[in-house]
Image (cartoon, rainbow, N blue to C red):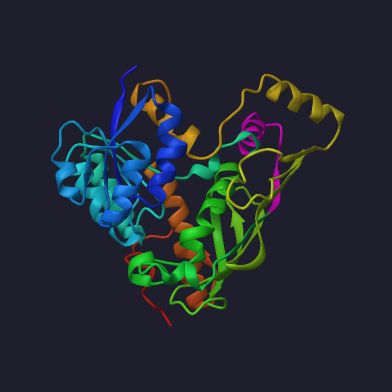
Amino acid sequence: MSIRTVAIVGCGIGRSHIVEGYLPHADKFKVAAICDLNEQRLAAVGDEFGIERRTTSFAELLADDTIDIIDICTPPGIHLEQVVAALAAGKHVVCEKPLTGSLAGVDTIMEAERNAKGVLMPIFQYRYGDGIQKAKRIIDAGIAGKAYTASVETFWLRKPEYYAVPWRGKWATELGGVLVTHALHLHDMLMHLMGPAARVFGRVATRVNDIEVEDCASASLLMENGAFVSLSCTLGSQEQMSRLRLHFENVTFESTHEPYTPGKDPWKIIAANDDVQEKIDRVVGDWQPVAPRFTTQMGQFHAFLSGQGPLPVTTTDARRALELVTAIYQSSDSGAEVPLPVGPDSPKYADWRARTK
């Protein structure tokens, strides 16, 4: 098994990638370099994990043939240019969400990826954990049956000190608010389990903090499979929680309410009757634990690079999540329901920050 060398660019969330993603797989990855413009943070993370190579130069890492993977954990406003540059340099790329700030940007990245030697894996670490993976196995086995309705709630708390970080809360650098930076995780989980949306009506507002971007949003979705879904998110909840509740013909699923690990057990898996329960027991009876968040996503990424499994999260997955964001922003501006797919004719395709009122 070959060990892949990694350079972390951005030592904020990048530290979590090291702790949860790479250290548990020390036989698969080596964090060979870290990069950050904040030299104090660069030194702190380097000292903590014994990483000797530290640089403030992204270009230096791109030119280094000993680096296999560039892991981009920088502010969202520069993801697009860094992803494209890393792919052009022949690297495999991991990129934190949001991948970029428009569907046009995602399409630019997808074109770059088609011509690249390496692959891109966007981060959607909330897909991993025993709870969501059991639900996924049951649904994929056909046991759940017809999808009826679902509700998805991202109720988090962000106070003014959170926005003291200069790039947060601004359209130019964070690219969006609760829909883009926070609820994107839960909305991806929904579509991972229930499939894509077909029509979207949404509203967004800034009600909690003195910032540019939205911190409250709600949306009503008609899914391609006919199910109705309600989304609700705020950064003003005094009790933080993340919750998915999905109702199918034969099974109801409800996630744990843990705000930042909703994929973990215990999930409620409520069978319609004893026959359904027996089928569920057969499907998950040989269950092997699935580590949450980055641990499993990075492990599956290495398996893909070694030819032993599919790419766990694709650029298409990231595009689907950002298409939903685009549709909610467009609907909120226009007051009208938005059909999907969202294409170049949308006023939000090139930049969802463009106002259409």
User: In this view, which residue lies farthest toward the right?
Assistant: 274
Identity of the residue drawn at 71% across and 32% down: 143
- Count the marks: 0
Query: Image height check: is 8 above or below 348?
Result: above
User: In this view, which residue lies farthest toward the top?
Assistant: 1
Would you say residue 340 is visible in this rendering? Answer: no
Residue 206 lies in magenta, yes or no?
A: no
The stretch of residues the image draws in magenta is 132-150
Residue 133 lies in magenta, yes or no?
A: yes
User: In this view, which residue lies farthest toward the bottom?
Assistant: 357
Q: Quadrant of the N terminus?
A: top left
Query: Image height check: is 196 above or below 69?
Result: below
Q: Quadrant of the C terminus?
A: bottom left
Identity of the residue drawn at 42% across and 60% down: 342
Would you say residue 91 is visible in this rendering? Answer: yes
Compare residues 58 and 330 and report the one nearer the observer. Answer: 58
Q: Where residue 57 appears, x then y in whole percent? A: 18, 50
Q: Where residue 39 appears, x then y in whole percent? A: 26, 55
Q: Is 280 displayed left or right of 41 in the figure?
A: right
Q: Where residue 262 appears, x then y in whole percent? A: 62, 46
Query: Image height check: is 207 above or below 103?
Result: below
Compare residues 88 and 223 and report the one nearer the observer. Answer: 88
Identity of the residue drawn at 43% across and 77% down: 212
Query: Image height check: is 254 above or below 199?
Result: above
Q: Is 146 displayed left or right of 67 in the figure?
A: right
Residue 129 in which image quadrant: top right
Residue 64 in which image quadrant: top left
Identity of the residue drawn at 34% across and 48% down: 44
Q: Is 98 displayed left or right of 67 in the figure?
A: right
Q: Where residue 22 appears, x then y in whole percent? A: 40, 33
